[in-house]
Image (cartoon, rainbow, N blue to C red):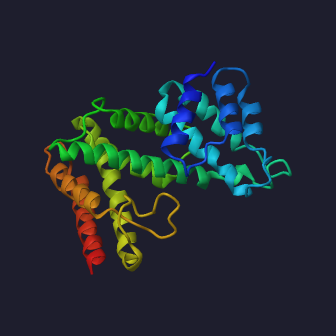
Amino acid sequence: MATEYDELFVRLRVEHPKASYPESECSTLTSYLNGDIDAQTCATELTKYTNRRLPVSSKRCICDIIIQLSINFAETHEDLVILVKEIRSIPASKETGDIDWTKEKGSFDEAFRGFYDSIWSLMFEAEKARGRKPIPGQSEASRRWSNINAFGARLEHEGLLDDMLNALRLIVKVLETKQSEAQVQMNLGAAAAWLEFASKEIKEHASRVGAHTNWAQGSNNRKEPTVDGKRMAYWKDRLVELSGSPSVGEEVAASCERAAIAIEQALWEKKK
């Protein structure tokens, strides 16, 4: 009998015909989430390079499949984090097609970033078109956004996400969601510091900067740094707004001002 996971994979193959959701890998993940096999067995099976007609790099599709599951089923997060840790422990061998999964952190980070940007864009642009800020729980996109952030928090807690991704999540949390004064005090300085750093990096590489992504490092496997100018401008305005809050100290306010100036300079260079 088909499970909800099987139904998801069928739908994904229809909606994304160019993406890779192989029967074997999807079936293995379904067995794991149904409790039929343990995490170690699942990781071993997922990383086996058995279809020699495809390049060994095709095995990296398991990163996309895991993240799709986390986006659609919040209840899988704990099991998926355990699985990711098991996958990361598998060294290169003939069975893996010589892929050393202990060094494949970048593949998972890139996959996470691609989905993170895509879901954010769908949710934020849809809500903005209606003339309001995104409201959690008000749409399918916002549910997926909530799920990927919850999964990201678990990955961060286990040290399984890159620092840049953790910084992006922090910035989004502080500047794009409603925060209490205590949360603003705790996180605004760090968000401003990261944005100042990223903006200076963008400015230095302005001749190679494109559009459509949302950070100093590109998503979706782009080779060059790219940045979403509209989103950076929005962050700049939010920094200025929050820095004027009575609860924000002088040092953090100064950091916000430096970051806002750095963003403006980066965007100016981008236009030239």
- Can residue 176 be seen? yes
Q: Residue at the location (53% across, 54% down)? A: 110
Q: Residue at x 53, y 32 (%)?
A: 8
Q: Is residue 244 above or below residue 43?
A: below
- Looking at the picture, how far across and down is residue 43, in whole percent? 72, 37
Q: Position of residue 55 (x, y in %)?
A: 73, 58
The quarter of the picture where the C terminus appears is bottom left
Q: What residue occupies the far top of the structure in this picture?
A: 1
Marks counted in the figure total 0
Instruction: Tell me what residue is drawn at x 33 percent, y 62 percent.
Output: 228
Vertically, is 232 above or below 24? below
Q: Is residue 6 left or right of residue 186?
A: right
Displayed quadrant of residue 232: bottom left
Which residue is rendered at x = 47% and y = 32% of the image?
A: 72
Viewer-proximal residue among 268 and 70? 70
Left or right of 30, for residue 95: right
Q: Looking at the image, which is closer to me, 14 or 258?
A: 14
The x and y percentages for residue 144 are 40, 35
Q: Is residue 77 above or below residue 260?
A: above
